[in-house]
Amino acid sequence: MGTRIAIDNPDDDRLGVFRLRERGLTNRADKRDDTGAGMFLAEGDLVVTRAYEAGCVPVAALADADRVPAIADLLDCAVYVGGDAVRAMVTGLGMPHPIVAVFERPGRPSASALLARSHRLVVAERVDNPANIGGIVRNAAGLGWDGLLLDGTSADPLSRRALRVAMGTAFALPHARTRELVDVLGDLGDAIDLLALTPDNDAPSIDDVAATLDPQRPRAVLIGAERSGLSEALLACSRPVRIPMSAGVDSLNAAAASAVACHVLR
């Protein structure tokens, strides 16, 4: 059980960890470390609870002194409690959550290990918007996909904004990161169906492609950046699929497209 410590000064040095922004919590080297390095901030009792239940190690928590959420009693760390003004100043949130907590970043599987155990995989290339990554995570987890593979430039699923959008479902969806995405997927040969989302009108409809797939074979849906799409190298080693759109609209955003694809192709 965490020790509750009342705080009424937002400049209190003990609250320094809650004033850290994204780069202060996790630097580039941390994000590349599969063993787990750096920290992440979970916002709200639901996300904090899901992080705790997934086995993430808490560093410190900051809760509303007037209504401390039940999860605070389970965290084995200092639990600071304060009013709205303290919590808003420290976390930078205009409407502070009942609780926020900093956790150690957990380890993650390597790209090869994730591929070996995933039957339904989502692959993101150059999706650098954390909100889109959060949406992709929530869609994939909610629709029964079992892994997320990211290239080196896509946003971090454990960033504050991604975790908020995903509502903490990142802890239920294993993810891996690689800077050699094309090589990693290319080495699989024909062991997996690689299905690349594209707005190209010459690509077959996602519904038609789904009807031809063997449900016993592993498959991956590939999602690229909203403006540039997937790289030519990835398109060359995968099967293009198109979500039919109304005239005058070329595509959905990455998160919305992932919801359609994860539903139709699951």
Image: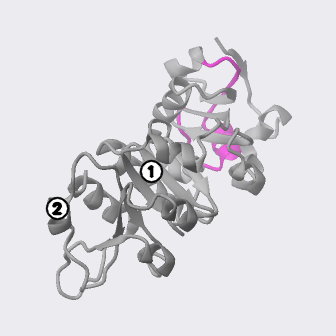
Q: Is residue 20 above or below residue 51?
A: below
Q: Is residue 8 above or below residue 43?
A: above
Where residue 221 sits, quadrant-wise, is: bottom left
Q: Is residue 94 found inside the magenta-colored segment of the image?
A: yes
62 relative position to 48: left or right: right
Residue at point 20% right, 66% down?
209
Mark 2 surroundings: few (<14), some (14-19) or many (≥20) residues within 10 A: few
- Whole-Å distance between the Cαs marked 2 and 1? 33 Å
Mark 1 surroundings: few (<14), some (14-19) or many (≥20) residues within 10 A: many
Q: Is residue 249 above or below residue 91?
A: below
Q: Secondary structure at mark 1?
A: helix
Q: Is residue 115 above or below residue 35?
A: below
Question: Looking at numbered disc 1 in the image, what kind of residue is underneath it?
Answer: Val
Q: Is residue 43 found inside the magenta-colored segment of the image?
A: no
For disc 2, the marked residue is 212
Q: On residue 143, which mark appears?
A: none
Front-most of residues 39 and 143:
143
Residue 202: image x %, image y %? 24, 86
For disc 1, the marked residue is 165
Single out the residue that lies furthest toward the bottom: 248
Front-most of residues 192 and 177:
192
Front-most of residues 52 and 173:
173
Residue 54: image x %, image y %? 52, 27
Residue at point 82% right, 32% down?
14
164 relative position to 12: left or right: left
Question: Looking at numbered disc 2 in the image, what kind of residue is underneath it?
Answer: Thr
What range is drawn magenta here?
75-98
Where residue 252 sits, quadrant-wise, is: bottom left
